[in-house]
Image (cartoon, rainbow, N blue to C red):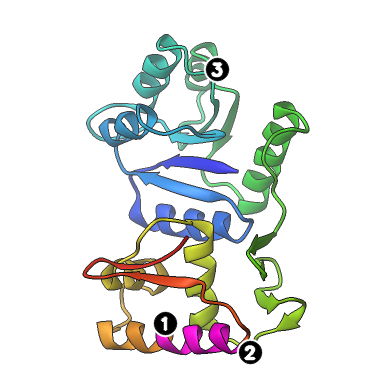
Amino acid sequence: MKVLLVEDSPVLQRSLSTGLSKHAITVDQAFDGEEAELYLQSETYDVIILDLMLPKLSGLDVLKRMRHRGNKTFVLILSAKDEIEDRTRGLDLGADDYLIKPFSFDELISRLRALKRRMGNSGPSLDPVMVVEQVSIDTLNRTVSVNDTALELTPTEYRIIELLATRRKQTYSHDQLIDRLYRADQCVTRNAIEAHVSALRRKLRAAGQELIRTRRGFGYYID
């Protein structure tokens, strides 16, 4: 499943995108309404998770514009607003579901599963196991195996391969990996990231897999 998460809170963005990736959901992140518009005009999504109170362009305006263009992608609204009129207006503009902050992550996943069922059996899967070539990544149990043989990975090595596999073909720089994998109060160097990637590559190579590639000067990716 591919999701566009439109939310202006960096903390909520990070926690939700990390959690969704563990369910093999690919996440693009937009932090304001205008950025969301750019994504919607160039990418296709299964579900849009849309906050109402956004900078530059409100969530309701984003919803109104996409429906006016004929974009029928499922929309799940997130908002701190619990007034009935706000919910009603969002649904009247074409939203498919509404979740009020604060909410439990399990409830969000349940709502996404419900939207998945509405897509039909031919839609994308919420299977927690990702398979890339002969490498299986179990995002529920946080394990990696090659041809059913488990690899002994450190927590950081696992998070790196999970992130790169979830966002296949996207290149992550050292700084982007640090931002996605560590808390803001943790001090991590580029050399540390290079060491983790190098160790991960050695373990994959020993199992006969050359999975992680380097785009020189830009970062790492999985094809």
Q: Which residues are magenta?
A: 197-206
Picture coordinates of residue 163, whole percent (x, y):
49, 65
* 160 displayed left or right of 135: left
Work out which quarter of the rendered image holds the N terminus and state it.
Answer: top right
Kindly state the secondary structure of the residue where label 2 is placed.
Answer: loop
Q: Is residue 182 magenta?
A: no
Between the C-alphas of marks 3 and 1, the distance is 45 Å
Task: Indicate which disc residue 152 carries.
Answer: 2
SS assignment for the magenta stretch, majority: helix
Residue at 43 percent of width and 53 percent of height: 12
**In terms of sequence position, does the residue under pointer 3 or pointer 2 come before the other?**
3
What is the three-letter code of the residue carrying label 2?
A: Glu
Quarter of image, res 8: top left
Picture coordinates of residue 27, whole percent (x, y):
48, 48
**In terms of sequence position, does the residue under pointer 1 or pointer 2 come before the other?**
2
Picture coordinates of residue 161, whole percent (x, y):
52, 72
Dot 2 alpha-carbon crowd within 10 angstroms: few under 14, some 14 to 19, many 20 or more:
few
Q: Which residue is mark 1?
A: 197
What is the three-letter code of the residue carrying label 1?
A: Val
What is the three-letter code of the residue carrying label 3?
A: Leu
Residue at 32 percent of width and 28 percent of height: 37
Q: Which residue is mark 3?
A: 91
Query: Is residue 37 in sight in this rendering?
Result: yes
Between the C-alphas of marks 3 and 2, the distance is 48 Å
